[in-house]
Image (cartoon, rainbow, N blue to C red):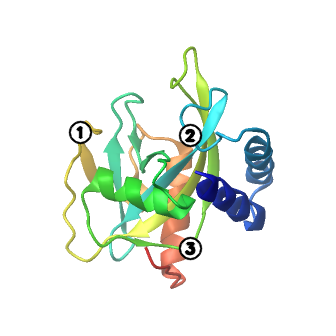
Amino acid sequence: MSLLHDDAIEVLSSWTAPTPEEEALRAEFLEHLRTHDDAMLRECVPGHLTATTAVLSHDGSKVLLTLHPKAKMWLPMGGHCEISDTSLAAAALREAWEESGISGLELLPGPLAVDKHVVWCHPPHSWHLDVEYAAVAPAGAEAVMSEESLDLRWFPVDEIPELSDEATRRLAARGQAALGSGSRMLG
């Protein structure tokens, strides 16, 4: 787990946040990593780092969203890091594959965003300190719904349903922009 912890520090230390709000979150995430050896694990009670991935269609026109059973909202793929994950990027790609069922996803360079939200991993609540990426699906890819979803659908990036959130819209738009710039990384 120390590899993943070290990777998170390196990734967040070298990432340039695009907004003042995200810069404040980046600094908060780094402080959390410095003060919690278990910051990458769901067992970290005050909060833990998580990895999210907006899965884009091959041409970037659509984003695959899951109807999350607890949040009851359309959200990108994502979740907790696992002991077997060696990097945040690897965790993001694993979560995307597990929840979309799509093989051959190609991760775009990232992270593209950070977000912090209340969750109920440790009642009454704790925090997900979310590091967000985007991945591109191969042409003709068909999603397969996992047990972690109530529904799974492709939406045009500029028509994400109201039953979603601004973090999802922001990540999808940033992923689309990154894809449009020709950025790719090995997944």
Q: Residue at x 42, y 62 (%)?
A: 93
Disc 2: CA contacts within 10 A as few (<14), some (14-19) or many (>=20): some
Q: Earlier in the sequence, mark 2 or mark 3?
A: 2
In screen coordinates, is 181 left or right of 137?
right
The residue tagged 3 is: 109
Label 1: which residue? 147
- Marks 2 and 1: which is nearer the front? 2
Considering only order in the chain, which callout, 1 or 2, is on the residue closer to the N terminus? Answer: 2
The image shows residue 18 at horizontal and vertical percentages of 73, 62
- Rendered position, 11 above or below 127: below
For this orientation, the residue located farthest to the front is: 2
Q: Is residue 55 left or right of residue 148?
A: right
- Please report the residue visible at 44 percent of the width from the left and 40 percent of the height from the top: 164
Contact, mark 1 vs mark 3 (Cβ under 8 Å): no
- Disc 2 versus disc 3: nearer the observer: 2
| Mark 2 element type | loop
Residue beneath label 2, please? 41
Q: Give amino acid for label 1.
A: Glu
For the point 51% across and 26% down, which residue is it?
A: 121
Report, in whole angstroms, how far the alpha carbon at label 1 lies from the one at label 3.
Answer: 28 Å
Sort mark 1 into few (<14), some (14-19) or many (20+) by Cα contacts within 10 Å.
few
